[in-house]
Amino acid sequence: MLQIYNTLTRQKEYFRPLHEGHVGMYVCGPTVYGDAHLGHARPAITFDLLYRYFLHLGYKVRYVRNITDVGHLEHDADEGEDKIAKKARLEQLEPMEVVQYYTNRYHHDMEALNVLPPSIEPHASGHIIEQIAFVQRILDHGYAYISNGSVYMDVEKYAKDFPYGKLSGRNLEDIKTDTRELDGQDEKKHSYDFALWKKAAPEHIMHWPSPWSEGFPGWHMECSTMGTKYLGEEFDIHGGGMDLMFPHHEAEIAQSCAALGHDTVHYWMHNNMITIAGKKMGKSYNNFITLGQFFTGEHPLLTKPFSPMTIRFFILMAHYRSTVDFSSEALEAAEKGLARLQEAYNRLMRLTPSPESTVQIGNIREKCEEAMEDDLNSPIVISHLFESAKAINTVADGKGTISAADLKELQDVWKTFVFDILGLRLNDNSDTGSTTAEAYKGAVDLLLNIRLDAKRNKDWTTSDRIRNSLTELGFSIKDTKDGFEWSI
RNA sequence: GGUCGGUUGCCCGAGUGGUUAGGGACCGGUCUGCAAAACCGGGGACAGCGGUUCGAAUCUGCUACCGACCUCCA
């Protein structure tokens, strides 16, 4: 039975869905005002793993991941200029043009990483009406106040009736002493109150009418609104990066409780950060490397380009609640490990069964399932796959045999865990595919068989010519004991 | 300053109180016309000092160091 770590209780809990056979999950998506970097890949892949595992278990999943395209303030001193608007002015583009541009690029990167698209990808800008209604409910319940056209959460009042800070392990007293004094907070009663609706400054481009002012929704409003709109007033899982725990998710809880009178989320899940030289990779440190830069290798810290699957594998090699330290060296190690899996997979699909097994495949399926059920322990799943790769290689080398039943089981386990669950996209040479692909493969095989004949006749000139020419064309040719292997 | 987390072999990275994580690198071997690759095998670790225990990397205390959040951040 699947166990997941619930940030709310700080322990692993058995996952029990609210509605039998169904899972509702909401994950904080990107703010589309810049290219996605390695840090954005972490939650996308982590929750993709969870999503895939739920599907594997047979759940019907509604997976909502938002696009933030309004509302996040650059900083309070800006008095209401949000990130999208600022970027738009700089580039002389329509705000929605910027949104579309980066949304497209985000989708492109996610597809490259083999991250499945969510069931619903709502835009904050498309849910202004719902957000206004949500704010109104909070006002109606008396947990918010209007000040100069803006609406603020009355945290002190809220904290009297609900445990404010329970997710991040804070209490209001701590927050009172720790919150820094920032500029432009004179319209708030307290510095720790947060905006539900912000009146737009005259130069602000993105704004909508509301009962309180021409303005835009507060920073945390969209998630409360869209989460409950699509998943209901109570739903199973809410995920996101650890850095969103406070204030973002704490504010979300407060907003939802204030509006609805009760909690909405059963399991809060948070992925840890990716670090670079021990420091968090993030916008604020300006130390990030975009996914596009990884794919092209165009960054001073990168020794070479890295494929999207290498990035995915690299992230899956660490548990999602641990930090993972990026370095080009670590990525190269991941790349080689992935290639080893690829080799083993290719061999596995070509093995011929024997009456008996001399290699042990063990109960690999159960072991992989156990690892996944223990809070998505992907590194352990991967270690089991490497273990079985040894058995595969032993048989491929002719130093062992495998029975038809064991072979089928192993092939099935690999397909299930490598493709379906870990979501690794390997080159599938065993795939019969199209007639074009068949003809192409047949042609290459033919060439290499001619080379094999040449080798038998010790015609090294012809042999090397074929190998060198194919290498130049981008093929990788490997001689084996009784033949050859090739890939491109 | 407050809250929380981390410190594992050359590097990355799992971990249950007692039995090999795994990957990369390295070393040795096999294969081999050459080359490349591949495959097999190997050594090494639990920040420091105490405590609990028959036994602790794993529980506990202290110390040191690192980091996250407290402000937009995945």
Image (spheres, grey):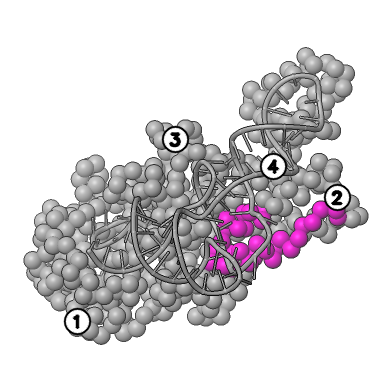
Residue that label 1 marks: A157
Q: Work out whether residue A361 or residue A24 is closer to the camera in this orientation and state it.
A: A361
Secondary element type, mark 2: loop
Dot 4 or dot 2: first in sequence order is 4
Depth order, front residue of A55/A288 = A288
Cα–Cα gap, marks 4 and 2:
18 Å
Q: Residue at x 88, y 18 (%)?
A: A457
Q: Are marks 3 and 2 on the same chain?
A: yes
The mark nearer the N terminus, 2 or 1, is 1
- Real-space Cα distance between discs 3 and 2? 42 Å
Closer to viewer: mark 4 or mark 2 = 2
Q: Which residue is mark 4?
A: A343
| Residue A195 visible to an observer of this rendering | no
Q: Chain of mark 3?
A: A
Classify residue A414 as left or right of residue B47. Answer: right
Please report contact status of discs 4 and 2: CB closer than 8 Å, yes or no: no
* Mark 1, secondary structure of its residue: helix
Q: Position of residue A427 (x, y in %)?
A: 65, 43
The answer to which of A474 and A389 lies nearer the viewer is A389
Residue drawn 25% across the image and 85% down it: A161
Reading the image, the residue beneath label 2 is A401
**Which of the pair A113/A210 is nearer the observer?**
A113
Can see residue A176? yes
